[in-house]
Image: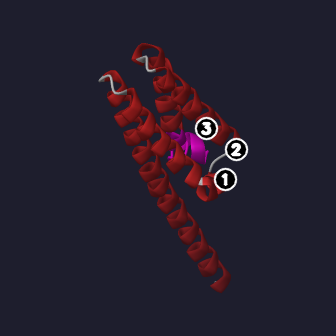
Amino acid sequence: MKKEIIAAVLLLLLFAGVLVNIRINESIVSSLMHEVDLSYESLKNGDGNKAARQLDNAIEHWLELDGYTHIFIRHSEINSTTDAFYGFRSDVGSGDSGSAQGSYWLLKETLLSLMTMEQISLGSVF
């Protein structure tokens, strides 16, 4: 009986860890999405330099998360997110909000994908 109780406690701790990871992931991605949104808004308002600075801050934030992302996120997802960041950065550098719109939405969807793939669903359990 003692082994079963220990196993149940370990399973509960593991589940609690999963829930904490989901909250951390949602917080990180929400913060990054906010930074990207601010950059795109600045670009649409005609302030390309401000947009570039804001996006550079978001990219730096993303790169600083390396210790977390390389443990909890698949490397293919990390690579596609990084590519999306730099694709948007390239378009922001051109100063044309029209050409940046596609790369902005690609980055937003990539970030959203990072958040939704960590959430618990019936498909992820069974």
Q: CA distance from mark 2 to mark 3?
A: 10 Å
Q: Which residue is mark 2?
A: 75
Residue 112 in picture, x, y percent from top left:
48, 36
Q: Answer with left or right where residue 94 lies relative to residue 66.
A: left
Residue type at numbered disc 2: His
**Dot 1 or dot 3, earlier in sequence:** 1
Q: Residues within 10 Å of mark 3 (few under 14, many from 20)?
A: some
Color scheme of the displayed model? secondary structure
- Looking at the rendered image, the quarter that the C terminus falls into is top right
**Dot 2 or dot 3, earlier in sequence:** 2
Residue type at numbered disc 3: Thr
**Magenta residues, as a range?**
114-126
On whether residue 89 falls in the magenta region, the answer is: no
Q: CA distance from mark 2 to mark 1?
A: 7 Å
* Mark identifier at residue 70: 1
Q: Which residue is mark 3?
A: 82
Residue 82 in picture, x, y percent from top left:
61, 38
Q: Tell me what residue is drawn at x 54 percent, y 41 percent.
A: 114
82, 6: nearer the viewer = 82
Q: Residues within 10 Å of mark 2 (few under 14, many from 20)?
A: few
Label 1 or label 3, whichever lies nearer to me, is: 3
Q: Tell me what residue is drawn at x 67 percent, y 38 percent.
A: 79
Q: Are marks 2 and 1 in contact (CB under 8 Å)?
A: yes
Residue 98 in picture, x, y percent from top left:
42, 13
Label 2 or label 3, whichever lies nearer to me, is: 3
Q: Are marks 1 and 3 in contact (CB under 8 Å)?
A: no
Q: CA distance from mark 1 to mark 3?
A: 13 Å
Furthest-bottom residue in this view: 2
Q: Label 1: state its secondary structure.
A: helix
- Looking at the rendered image, the quarter that the N terminus falls into is bottom right
Residue type at numbered disc 1: His
